[in-house]
Image (cartoon, helix red, strand yellow):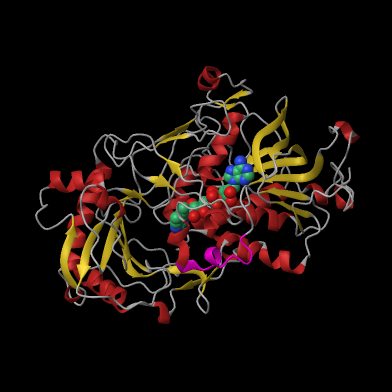
Amino acid sequence: MSSNDPDPGRGGRREDGADGAPSGSSVYDYVIVGGGTAGSVIASRLTEDPDVTVALIEGGPSDVDRPEVLTLRRWLGLLGGELDYDYPTTIQPRGNSHIRHSRAKVLGGCSSHNTLISFKPLPSDWDEWEEAGASGWNAASMESYFGKLRNNIVPVHEKDRNAIARDWVEAAVTATGVPRVEGFNAAPFHEGAGFFDLAYHPEDNKRSSASVAYLHPHLAAGDRPGLDLLLETWAFRLELDGERATGVHVRAADGTESLLRARREVVVCAGAVDTPRLLLHSGLGPAADLAELGIPVVRDLPGVGENLLDHPESVIVWETDGPIPDNSAMDSDAGLFVRRDPEAAGPDLMFHFYQIPFTDNPERIGYERPPHGVSMTPNIPKPRSRGRLYLTSADPDVKPALDFRYFTDEDDYDGRTLVDGIRLAREIARTEPFARWLRREVCPGPQVTSDEELSAYARQVAHTVYHPAGTCRMGAEDDALAVVDPQLRVRGLSGLRIADASVFPTMFAVNPMIGVLMVGEKAADLLRAGPSGRNPHDSHEEPTTPGGVA
Ligand SMILES: Cc1cc2nc3c(=O)[nH]c(=O)nc-3n(C[C@H](O)[C@H](O)[C@H](O)COP(=O)(O)OP(=O)(O)OC[C@H]3O[C@@H](n4cnc5c(N)ncnc54)[C@H](O)[C@@H]3O)c2cc1C
């Protein structure tokens, strides 16, 4: 495995002029865009076969030897910094227009700056995908992929269980009547309170991100000769030969542009924002929108950028009666799931408990940050509002517009869910042993009581749980807005697949990272099976020579 080294001398990957390849282009079996959560898994799995060559294009730098990235508890310090693409939202008339969407610009992608809360998606989540046209993605079919994950997924360690978080869990169980859960991944659940499972190494608080689990061992051992890791390299356009994707145009950190060609397939794993962005700039998207911007239309794919999903949340903050103990895995170690509607397939209200006063949004409307405090952040597991991502310029360097249309669903289900959340949070705050820690409710404050006032507050200070998804959704042939089929192949094209959070047809009720890793594992199987469903390396079609020279 080499970094930034599409080396013509090593295995002969460069094919100057050969096979019609333009001079200076490098040829691989697979070219993967995005060394993030799903991309790291796929690159690692494909190069288990020493005869396979893969270029992994990553916009950010390596995370190796970077304690500010690898130490889980330092996650908040990464948001908005140099390793964050930091996407704004459009004006949100019923929500908070100031939300910034953090997306990591570093090897491992968002698994390198997130909180690594690890939920196996619920059976009802996968079965909903199947019903939405993602044939073969039901719970029974997906089960084995959880077992394949290489990440170290463990419950928050005893030493990291803060006394106030323990008391919060006890109060949440008493106040809501939900079961206490020890190990949320042990069995499917509808409700429950407890400490999370995290992908981390408790002994030193090191992340078990996609890059740490799937790439670092091979970087250290040098045992993946077929994998070229191109860091700080930006993919700005797909190379399309008629209706076949044949490569990716990239720009290196020094500004040099080159074309990486894929003998077998191009796999886009750039995440729910940058995957549709790359497709749109390559002429794949809603034809009228592209034409208006002067981008030549290669294929009219009306679903690219549609179905923008997220988990919105709000926040209630309390001042505590003095400082709280300092131990923690990452300051939001426990949570609560509630099912208000007994007919719902899974939980319909979720809380993260924060051992910090999370006042960033309330401060904007005049609230003050208490010297010591805690927060509860109710979120909507199955939100009904749907947004849209679109381009505002043909310049690939201009960030796309993200219009989440927060709280715009017809029946105001999303807004009402957060109001229920605030009321429930107050019940927990009145319940011992948690109540004795609290001095006062800071925001919204006890004077805010009516549904209307609570809804206005909840939406004004709303935040994101940072789970954008769905912008290149998977679906059946008769789904006009499906971008990929259940084999993750982009509709109407060959040689091009997508594997990341953008393919979600619907949102999981739980935090999505484990689901994205499982998408990566399944994508590797689908790729190995070849476009026809047979593994090209086990058959006589399209033979390659070792080292990747055609
Ligand atoms: C702050 C934060 C906290 C979160 N906490 C949790 C949590 O605790 N639990 C959970 O389940 N989920 C959590 N999530 C969500 C979860 O991390 C994401 O859903 C998931 O990691 C997305 O994976 P992905 O593969 O789709 O994209 P990413 O992991 O974002 O990977 C995309 C990669 O592509 C690269 N890239 C993009 N465009 C290009 C381009 N044009 N050229 C080259 N490279 C490119 C990026 O640099 C990045 O490395 C959190 C997210 C954030 C931001």
Image coords of residue 390 (percent x, y): 48, 30
243 relative to 472 in the view: left or right: right
Q: Is residue 70 magenta?
A: yes
Q: Nearer the viewer, residue 416 or 31?
A: 31
Q: Is residue 122 shown to the viewer in this render? A: no
322 relative to 223 in the view: left or right: left
Q: Residue furthest bottom?
A: 159
Q: Nearer the viewer, residue 32 or 317?
A: 317
Image coords of residue 44 (percent x, y): 69, 58
Instruction: Name the residue located 65 percent from the left edge and 62 percent from the top edge.
Output: 214
Vertical arrangement, residue 160 with respect to residue 279, above or below: below
Q: Is residue 91 magenta?
A: no
Magenta segment: 63-73
Count all numbered tags in the image, as a single digit: 0
Q: Nearer the viewer, residue 545 or 31?
A: 31
Instruction: Name the residue located 88 percent from the left edge and 52 percent from the top edge.
Output: 11
Image coords of residue 73 (percent x, y): 45, 68
Instruction: Name the residue located 26 percent from the left edge and 34 percent from the top edge.
Output: 410
The quadrant in which the N terminus is found is bottom right
The quadrant in which the C terminus is found is top right
Q: Nearer the viewer, residue 375 or 122?
A: 375
Q: Is residue 85 shown to the viewer in this render? A: yes
Image coords of residue 181 (percent x, y): 35, 72
